Image (tube, coloured by chain):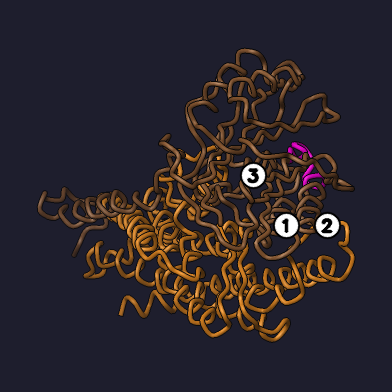
Chain colours: A orange, B brown
Amino acid sequence: MIARLECVRMLRSRRPALAVASLVFFLALMLLGFYTYAQTQTGGEVDFRYTYENRSYFNGLTFALYAFYFGFQLVLPIFVAAEGGVHLAGETSAGTMRLLLARPLSRARLFSTKLSLALAYSTALTGGFLALALGVGLVAVGWGDVDLYPGVLQMSERHEHLDQALALQRFLWIWPVASLAMTAPLCLSFLLSAYLRSPVNAVACSVALYLVLFVVSEIHFFEELRPWLFTSSMSYWRELLREEIDWKAVHQSAASLAGWSILFSGLALARFRHREEP
Amino acid sequence: MPSASASAIPFGRRLPEGLLILLGLFLIALGRGAFSARPTGFTLAPKPVDAVRVVTWNVGGAERGGKWRSMDDHSLETVKAVLLELNPDLVLLQEIGDRDQLEVLIDALGETWVLSSRLRSSGRRLAILARGGELDRFLLGGAAQSALAVHWTSQDRKISVLNLHADAFSASTRNEELGQSVDGLLRVLNGEGAIGLLGGDFNLDLDLDKRGDLFSDDQQLDVESYNYATSQFEDLGLGRGNTAAPDRRIDYLLLHAGQYTLGAGGPLKGRRSGQMDHDPLVVDLHLP
């Protein structure tokens, strides 16, 4: 009953619709950039450069990879963090938390229901974005094989080639793997939402903290800090696009991300069960 | 009716979140293995029989007071000692101060050694030193003329060697220097079994840990330069560790050969002196 109620409230909040619209807009911009880049880089205007790039390199699957890569790092976490940030702090701010807790319902049950719903939303958003990127790639560019070169998106040390069928299978595997990664910023935002009473503050802090951690993990000056940041592991799904997958590395990164998610959830639950409601 | 305010929770009821926190910490510790240790580099060992040991080394120093430093006499002693220890067959050096320093190195290495060098516009010298045989210099045009190019003929084997010190500041200039060096070297490699070696300090770093390289003015162009070169040549130092301060892999040995076996290799750590900022990159090759 409570799960159904929470689901209806989430849909009525229009947050999912706003997230989907933003992701579609992002894909449109990516498509525009991808098209103009492919034209200028392979249209005979770059004779002065020594390049490995060619027309067959730019296809719909490469587009989907680029779009998902950047969207996953910089767009999806914002909407996921926003979702997590409003759940607890939003109820407190609106004064509805007291009403919810007046029902014969434990705080742990309420917390787990809200977290489960947010996890389902995050998984659906990740999968939907990936499917949309692949669909746009197919319609607007046309699929083909995937070629990855050293330095490109920092995904491989040597040239890797995946034929179209294998690449599509790997994209399917990426969905649950990337969804697991997205649980870490979601649970972080739940933690902040358990401490802060304003949803605006909770969302802003979650997004700001994610971006700070992301930037630190991307700059190689901070190499020693990387193992201690969950953002360093989030793009581990890229491993699935190698010819030979290093499953040990995948499992270790998954364990780390699951660990951070569980840690944040545990701390959030501890806070939520103890805190006074105004 | 349950109270909306938090009441004192018995210890037993704190157990779920306590277990969650412990489980989270355990999984985080488990996942730390994903951040593997850096490669430790080349371990000094006697050269295997029949192996050709190749070394490339930028022996100059880091910038100080607005001037780039070529090898000084203190570093010369270090370079001499390290080369004697390594017992190489072919050595590519960058940032030599003057020809006298090369004479010192040749005298130390032995009378069978031969040498070819050229002065660059920067006032610093490129050099190729080889154990025995002959070095025949050849010229390349365009941006590749900044490289030192030789045919090394020894024991019925001919290797065409390019020693390149690419521009440190412009990815565009590096792109032309490396691209035209690749093209130029491929042009002189005629017939099956021809062996080409392109080495030196290329001043570009694309390793996986460099997600945002702060040393390049155009990382995408460096990506293109590297991939253009490695589409024809094998990167012998790949995955073997950083070669220059602070943690960059910018020294390369690229090989174009029909058949070969790659033995031990990597940067020899802990042998810099003074203002030196590069490690020697060493590889053992078994060539036909």
Q: Does the segment drawn in magenta span residue B165? A: yes
Nearest the eye: A217 or A51: A51
Query: Spatial distance from mark 2 to mark 1, Cα to Cα?
Result: 8 Å
Residue that carries the numbered disc 2 in the rendered image: A49
The answer for which chain carries disc 2 is A
Q: Position of residue B193 (x, y in %)?
A: 65, 62
Query: Spatial distance from mark 2 to mark 3, Cα to Cα?
Result: 36 Å
Q: Is residue A132 left or right of residue A278?
A: right
Residue that carries the numbered disc 3 in the rendered image: B154
Between circles 1 and 3, the one closer to the viewer is: 3
Secondary structure beneath disc 2? loop
Secondary structure beneath disc 1? helix
Residue that carries the numbered disc 1 in the rendered image: B224
Q: Give the magenta-colored segment's residue range.
A: B164-174
- Please, what is the three-letter code of the amino acid marked with disc 1? Glu
Residue, x 71% and y 42% (percent of image)?
B216
Secondary structure beneath disc 3? strand
Q: Is residue A112 left or right of residue B201?
A: left
- Residue farthest along the top direction in this orientation: B74
Please indicate, yes or no, whether residue A85 appears anywhere in the rendered image: yes
Q: Earlier in the sequence, mark 1 or mark 3?
A: 3
Quadrant in which residue A51 is drawn: bottom right
Nearest the eye: A169 or A116: A169
Say if mark 2 contacts mark 1, CB within 8 Å.
yes
- Residue farthest along the front direction in this orientation: B156
